[in-house]
Amino acid sequence: MTDTNARHSLRRNTLSIAGSVAMCMAFMGPATSVAFNTPPAAAGAGYALPLAVLLALIACLLVANTIAAFARKIPAAGFAYTFNTHGFGPAGGFISGWLLLLSYGMVAPMLLAAIGTYSSQFLAAVFHVHIAWQLMTLLFGLIVWGINALGISDSAKVAMVFLVLEVGVMLGLTLTILGKGGDHGLSLAPFSPTHSLGGTSGLGTGMLWGVLMFIGFESVATLGEEAKAAKRTVPVALFSAVIVIGTFYALTAYGAAIGYGPGHANAFAADASPWTTLAHRYWGVTWALMLTVIVGQFANFVSGSNSFVRVLFAMGREGILPKALGRTSRRQIPHIALGGYMLFSFAFTFLMGAKFGPLGVYSFAGTVLGLGMIIIYILISLAVIRFYRREHPSEFRWIRLGVLPVATAILMLLPIWGQIHPLPAWPNNLVPYLIVAWMVLGAGYLIFLRARRPALVSAMGHVFESDTEADTETAEETDRAPREADGRTPAAHRPDLQTGGTQ
């Protein structure tokens, strides 16, 4: 690999299967999702929240099937941008990448606002120390910036430790509720659609926030260039994350509903902090839950920002965004994309927080992220059909790569309906219009690129693709190579010794 290419490529083969699973699970933010997404989800689905979450789990498993099918052929950092370029062509890939920029771009502002306000409240409630949320946001933001600057492997280790802590505590509270029989005994009533406060639309709203709980599982696809044996690692990590954390979500949703009981369904739907109420009722303390949520937000922040930075890097490398974003440091870290994203996130969080408060930032950014990603899931599901029919016809299977992707797209229409009918309160009611305006802007930019830089448009999604495939094949061959007695790979099987350079 030449020095020029090295400055535009990520460090290969540094992320194991365990690290990949930890990163996408951490991005899903189990504790954060349960604590913050339960109130808006329950406001729509009510006592039927577990059913809405179960529908979200099924939908995300179908999406995982689609992403895995792409990842087995295209292990690249661009995710939907690269995938849909192969499925729909340059225009479809660009529009998908453009929407991904808006959607994933909301991850850091959403979590900066959440961790700032929640940690500030924790210090005030437990230690009676009052520190402005803006200062806590700045502190945590700088810490995450520093961790991510160390590289994806170190980020994964941090994410894994915090992930275990947050899941353990939330699972402990849920099991306590179920062990005590909840408010009125255990039953399957929460899985009945008749208990949805808003009917079908209410289930759609609950499913929208349920899908938002899962968002991040697909992020492992953005790490394809850095994962070991990516064509195997990415699919395994995808399904592992969705099944394990999805089961956790369904169990906690059931625990929350049972904890309130059918006689208090309206109180459940109206409670702005139901898990705090449950922790106080069933544990007698709330500080443990607050600390757990902060831990979860931190892990979510580390993983989520890493994934978006890879998307910025991929689009900068191809010249769709400023070329500087596609450069890496000597340690092959996309430092310019990382720095630019963190500065944008600080500015967005503080400016919007001054108007709507930190929780307003979380709600608005989360709605943009959720609705945008659902549209992307639909686009990917349709793109994979065309991709395999056109480029890999001998491997096309009607059920797995035809029927299931179409079913995914149809099922994902339910949370979209729940978001737009009826429209949410200000400023979240602006989200659908924001997405439409963003897409119109993107279409205009694409027309400009086609007129001024047609060669760049025709090459979308393919820059450095051959290098990625070659590096992946080399890693797989190295994994299969015979080992010497001391466990090292013989020099004859080591590309770095053959070329006289280093990987």
Image (tube, grey):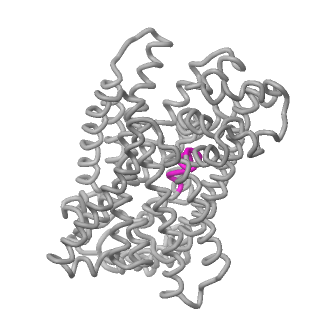
- State the residue lying farthest toward the bottom: 394
For the C terminus, which image quadrant?
A: bottom left
Q: Is residue 321 above or below residue 247?
A: below
Left or right: residue 103 versus residue 499 is right
Q: Is residue 211 magenta?
A: yes
Quick check: can you spot residue 81?
Answer: yes
Q: Position of residue 273 (x, y in %)?
A: 57, 25
Residue located at (35% from left, 53% from top)? 102
Please give the name of the residue rendered at 56% of the width and 48% of the height, measured from the top-left corner: 418
- Chief SS of the magenta region: helix
List x then y, in percent, for residue 62.
Answer: 62, 64
State the residue at coordinates (53%, 55%). 217
Task: Indicate whether residue 449 is drawn in magenta.
Answer: no
Q: Quadrant of residue 60?
A: bottom right
Q: Nearer the viewer, residue 326 or 447?
A: 447
Residue located farthest toward the top when viewing the structure as drawn: 128
Where residue 460 sits: x, y (%)? 30, 75
Residue interval drawn in magenta: 209-217
On the question of residue 165 being in view, the answer is no
The residue lying toward the viewer, choosing from 7 and 423, is 423
In the picture, which quadrant includes the N terminus? bottom left
Outermost residue, front side:
422
Number of callouts in the render? Answer: 0
